[in-house]
Amino acid sequence: MTTRRKKIYEGKAKILYEGPEPGTLIQYFKDDATAFNGEKKAQLEGKGVLNNRISEYIMTKLTGIGVQNHFIRRLSLREQLIREVEIIPLEVVCRNIAAGSLSNRFGLPEGQALPRSIIEFYFKDDKLNDPMVAEEHITAFNWANTQEIDDIMAVTLRVNDFLTGLFSAVGITLVDFKIEFGRVWENDFARVILADEISPDSCRLWDSATNEKLDKDRFRRDLGNVIESYTEVARRLGIMKDMPTVIQGGLH
Ligand code: TMP
């Protein structure tokens, strides 16, 4: 990048830069893929472009149904303008079907439907490996208050319902996903809105017909064809036409 600008935060898959106006930031999507808290690392050419566009598409759809979120507009292939929020240090996971750490924790076969959707909270702290926490920890340590937790859970279920339908319409099963929230202040009042990203990095997406994985588990589990799978998600969502030809033509 040629522009000189202030880096506010660098995570494993994204960088936040100072935005053009107060109260805004630029969210840059890297091609870096990591798993197991950064133990496993790779560069996947095109991932940043795909996640930038997929997340934009989903956040814009969510705005359309009244789910407020930080997305303002796409700036470039890997960058989007977002509203600055005070991030709540929680990873909010919502699950419809047993997989991943839930399957491991409770000995449930992957693919088993859950009796109802389950929301879990993890404390966002790499040094501690994002431990799972209860509402008691969240309120006692002041990460969020009870009203905010209620709001977060209600929005999470709405996002789940909406995304389940959105993906199901294109032959994809939404197994689970992780979202994050942030506070925005209006006068003396804080409101919680959706932040971060929603992409195949942060969801489990299975082809409805074959159960083939179309998400980051392809990277975590060395299944190959990671970019091809993210591309397939974008193609089914009908947004591949917006992609640069280098990605449309395949990046292998
Ligand atoms: P898990 O089964 O590994 O707990 O993951 C649950 C969901 O959360 C899955 O869709 C992947 C997503 N996730 C992230 O987005 N970031 C993470 O650091 C982890 C561990 C999971």
Image (tube, rainbow, N blue to C red):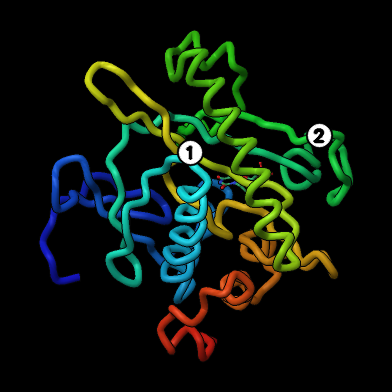
Decide: few, some or many residues near mark 1? Use Cα within 10 Å; few <14, some 14-19, many ≥20. Answer: many
For badge 1, the amino acid type reads Glu
**Local secondary structure at mark 2:** strand
Residue 113, compared with residue 200, is above or below; it is above
Q: Which residue is drawn at 66% across and 38% down?
A: 94
Q: Is residue 216 shown to the viewer in this render? A: yes
Residue 93: quarter of image? top right
Residue 19, compared with residue 243, is above or below; it is above
Residue beneath disc 1: 180
Q: Where is residue 55 in the image (x, y as percent from the top left)?
A: 47, 58
Q: Position of residue 54 (x, y in %)?
A: 50, 64
Q: Is residue 131 shown to the viewer in this render? A: no
**Local secondary structure at mark 1:** strand
Q: Looking at the rendering, in which quadrant would you find the N terminus?
A: bottom left
| First-in-chain label (1 vs 2) | 2
Frontmost of labels 1 and 2 is 2
For badge 2, the amino acid type reads Arg
Residue 167, compared with residue 132, is above or below; it is below
Residue beneath disc 2: 116
Q: Which residue is drawn at 18% across and 49% down?
A: 18
For label 1, being within 8 Å of ligand 1 is answered no
Give the side of residue 12 with respect to residue 62, left or right. Answer: left
Decide: few, some or many residues near mark 2? Use Cα within 10 Å; few <14, some 14-19, many ≥20. Answer: few
